[in-house]
Amino acid sequence: MFSKETYIKRRQQLKQDVDKGLVIFVGNSESPMNYADNTYRYRQDSSFLYFFGLNHPDLVGVIDVESGEECMYGDDYTIDHIVWMGNQPTIRERAGECGITNTKTLTQLAEDLKQAQAMGRPVHFLPVYRGESKIRLFEWLGVLPAEVKEKSSLELVKAVIKQRNYKSDEEIVEIEKAVNTTVEMHLAAMRMARPGMLEAEIAAEMERIAMSKDGYISFPVIATINGQTLHNHYHGNRLEDGRMFLLDAGAETNRGYAGDMSSTFPVGKTFTTRQKEIYQVALNSHEKAISMMKPGVAFKEVYFESAREVMRGMKELGFVKGDIDEGVAAGAHAMFFPCGLGHMMGLDVHDMEDLGEQYVGYDNEAKSTQFGLKSLRLGRTLEPGFVLTIEPGVYFIPQLIDLWKSEKRFTDFLNYDKIEQYKDFGGCRNEEDFLITADGYRLLGQPLPKTIADVERERLNAF
């Protein structure tokens, strides 16, 4: 946790940004893997962490924005729990750590919420994402699980985003800690990968490093020789010389802050000629996007220029023809670049994705429905305090190639004869994490090798 004054200040701002009524933050419960006492690793809800800092299950924080009163609801452990878990702080002791002195049981919460509803008071809640939290809202407020998103408070969503989108100095320190661990993970993969190894061996080492820092992974590890599958969590393939290996992995600190990086390197000592050519196209797009970042620039425009850079590079190699600007406007670049350019990052690796990308990443602007562009999670104008990723890539997805070719789509811009020759290529990307500053940007954490020369040097030293 940060100091209790940090959480008091955050809640005080929230009271100013929500007009009236009660605000409830539903903390996460334990999630069983296969029976009640055998649970997945516990992870607290990120907005609950932001305003209360308590990484403990079955807590609910309630703020009365009119009276200013705050209360932490939860049930103390009994002796039956303690004999298995050891001595535990009381709910009152836990609440005191974040500056709350008033505590009640969960049974009392149900009664208090019914009373508030009877009085016609607004009860604000966020669009919860776990099934057990939806059931609790139904029990307490009569909101059906299918109606949670619709009946959640947009006023509260916007008030939370207003704070969480801008990272404080102490948050940056924590994020940078996560990013440096993430760099260590990627360097370890570059140094250990060998032909004949299972992808799972590298994925396991990523988790080991994250846990050794008293943290955990910030999302399931992507460690694959099939980089054309953007979120590939299968780890059963063996590494083969002549293939590339794509790693997308990040660490999370014990306070919940995330790092997120990607790297691509040859399974053998060096890239092949065609791997170098495609990798350089992706890297040029990556560097172009970085060079544009500063306050006042719309991230959507950074994306478009990054896409144009991909198309320029692919045209030089014979994959693309025609006018580059027209091709990007039409969406032809999505053959190679079918995803977004980056996303906000903080207490969530995709920060506040549960609250709605149109509010977090677009400031309520409507998102595009165009293939490729619709996957851009961040499009809004950049501001100081934003933390975000940059991660363009170049991918050859056989099923997409077959589909678009059969539909004769974008034949004015795509050379399908050339593209067909690369259906077995896979994909590549680099990803780094940045803070938008008052006059530009700052790379977070230690730099990771990304030029062809630096990556090959790392690989040669590893053998």
Image (tube, helix red, strand yellow):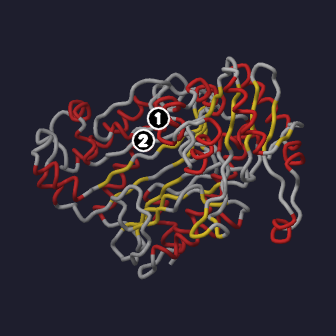
Which one is closest to the eye, mark 2 or mark 1? 1
| Picture layout, residue 115 above or below residue 41 | above
Q: Residue furthest bottom?
A: 196
Q: Position of residue 39 (x, y in %)?
A: 64, 66
Q: Nearer the viewer, residue 256 or 265?
A: 256
Q: Residue at x 35, y 37 (%)?
A: 374
User: Tag 2, which secondary structure?
Assistant: loop
Q: Residue at x 49, y 60 (%)?
A: 454
Q: Position of residue 261 (x, y in %)?
A: 53, 53
Q: Nearer the viewer, residue 106 or 449?
A: 106
Q: Residue at x 41, y 61 (%)?
A: 232
Q: CA distance from mark 2 to mark 1?
A: 8 Å
Which numbered circle lies on residue 65? none
Q: Residue at x 81, y 35 (%)?
A: 71
Q: Which residue is mark 2?
A: 341
| Picture layout, residue 42 above or below residue 15 | below
Q: Residues within 10 Å of mark 2 (few under 14, many from 20)?
A: many
Give the left or right position of residue 22, taking residue 182 as reference. Answer: right
Q: Which residue is mark 1?
A: 378
Give the left or right position of residue 283, taking residue 159 as reference. Answer: left
Give the left or right position of residue 180, taking residue 243 as reference. Answer: right
- Amino acid type of the residue tagged 1 in the rendering: Leu
- Amino acid type of the residue tagged 2 in the rendering: Leu
Q: Earlier in the sequence, mark 2 or mark 1?
A: 2
Q: Position of residue 53 (x, y in %)?
A: 76, 44
Res. 402 image quadrant: bottom left
Q: Position of residue 459 (x, y in %)?
A: 49, 70
Q: Residues within 10 Å of mark 1 (few under 14, many from 20)?
A: many
Q: Nearer the viewer, residue 368 or 279?
A: 368
Give the left or right position of residue 69, taking residue 309 as reference. Answer: right
Q: Are marks 2 and 1 in contact (CB under 8 Å)?
A: yes
User: Tag 1, which secondary structure?
Assistant: loop
